[in-house]
Image: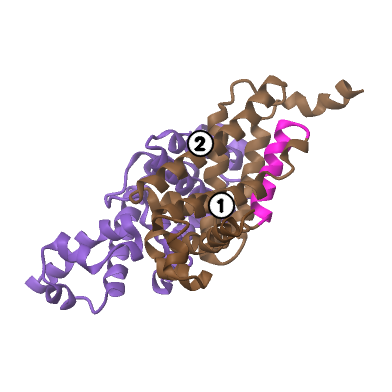
Chain colours: A brown, B purple
């Protein structure tokens, strides 16, 4: 990586928590200059505008938080176990970029605001939902999840409940909402499971 | 109401959707002047600062949205029916103040931002949760909801799931997430109900 590329990456990494905490409008280029210790020209050499930097900062924060949330998922056996592990990770592992979930922050910040960030947030939700839907569909095909379960409903409910709980937990300054969300989502996951699946598993394996 | 008080109320009503859409940092006093058609002195006669106006605008937006969401709740019979009606209202009735839920917007906006707004958002969540907890407790006392159900979990889950779903629906520009949230919450409400309660109701009434 060239020295220029290293500087670019450093600016992104240092801008990401500022945008994530303060939002697009609440973060000025001066805040970025203060955080990086660079001159104006040093930042504008790498980013044509505040929007361009905000986009890269959001991509960086989102990719970090998705990596944390889906880490090791492919090694978990079974759809219900995968979904349960995903809930567990969300509840237990804080984001590496301070300021809460970058996807929710940007979605709320940009729903009536910056259109480029809004599109990125929408794409982020879409990708996340597609991943969860795929797990549910695999579970249906594998006979583990009931056939009449709508994958989209499960994906929407998991994301909505966890993001909403994170919002409550952050504003309350405690973890109750996240833990309550986990308990409720575990009940929902038991509801979509084929009743025989769990009981029969040892027989199939045997 | 005096002419001065009327002007003050009009400023609050016109500022509320601007703050709700753009957030505290994203809304300037100039935006308020443009919306109200008033001179700077005309606004500052009623509000000492942007923060003071933002606080009143948030209170106004929150009180409107809570009224919409809990309208007619006291006339609904039974705890499960009350909770179900509340979910239904949230999903079906849009906020009267444009820009999404003022409570979630302010919670996300202020969790690393303005401390006065953060406290108001925390109080708003607290009041809302207390109301839902009360309904669950009444349901437990009345033998309608299982005794081992934690009221806090139900309040947190309802608010988290609905607010998260509203966030997804707004960024996607469709209603799927809200409708999926309703389906999942109805399943959770059935889960907390005493199984005999429903079946026995006609007998008790008879």
Picture residue at 72% right of the left edge, 25% below the top = A144
Task: Work out whether residue B128 can be spotted.
Answer: yes
Picture residue at 56% right of the left edge, 53% below the top = A61
Task: Work out whether residue B150 can be spotted.
Answer: no
Magenta stretch bounds: A77-93
Name the subunit of mark 1. Answer: A
As rendered, which of A28 and A113 lies closer to the eye? Answer: A28
Expressed as whole percent of the image width and height from the top left, the position of residue A93 reads 67, 55
Q: Mark 2 points at which residue?
A: A126
As rendered, which of B9 and A124 lies closer to the eye? Answer: A124
Q: Residue furthest right?
A: A206
Disc 2, SS: helix
Picture residue at 44% right of the left edge, 49% below the top = A107
Q: Name the residue under label 1.
A: A60
- Sequence-first disc among 2 and 1: 1
- Is A152 rendered above or below residue B163? above
Q: Do the residues labelled 2 and 1 touch (CB within 8 Å)?
A: no
Residue A157 figure quarter:
top right
Label 2 crowd bin: few (<14), some (14–19), many (20+), radius 10 Å: some
Q: Is residue A189 left or right of residue B190?
A: right
Q: In this view, does B153 lie to the left or right of A109?
A: right
As rendered, which of B143 and B81 lies closer to the eye? Answer: B81
Label 1 crowd bin: few (<14), some (14–19), many (20+), radius 10 Å: some
Q: Is the magenta stretch mostly helix, strand or loop?
A: helix
């Amino acid at each position: 990586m060239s020295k220029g590329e290293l500087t670019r990456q450093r600016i992104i990494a240092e801008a990401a928590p500022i945008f994530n905490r303060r939002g697009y409008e609440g973060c000025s280029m001066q805040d970025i200059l203060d955080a990086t210790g660079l001159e104006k020209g040093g930042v504008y050499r790498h980013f044509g505008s505040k929007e361009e930097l905000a986009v890269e900062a959001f991509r960086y924060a989102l990719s970090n938080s998705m990596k944390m949330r889906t880490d090791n998922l492919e090694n978990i056996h079974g759809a219900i176990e995968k979904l349960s592990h995903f809930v567990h990770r969300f509840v237990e592992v804080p984001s590496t970029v301070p300021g809460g979930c970058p996807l929710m922050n940007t979605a709320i910040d940009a729903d009536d605001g910056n259109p480029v960030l809004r599109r990125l947030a929408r794409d982020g939700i879409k990708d996340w939902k597609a991943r969860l839907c795929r797990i549910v569909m695999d579970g249906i095909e594998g006979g583990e999840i009931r056939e009449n379960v709508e994958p989209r409903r499960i994906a929407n409910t998991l994301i909505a409940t966890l993001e909403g709980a994170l919002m409550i937990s952050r504003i309350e300054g405690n973890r109750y909402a996240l833990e309550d969300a986990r308990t409720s989502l575990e009940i929902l996951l038991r509801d979509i499971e084929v009743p025989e699946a769990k009981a029969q598993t040892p027989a199939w394996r045997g």
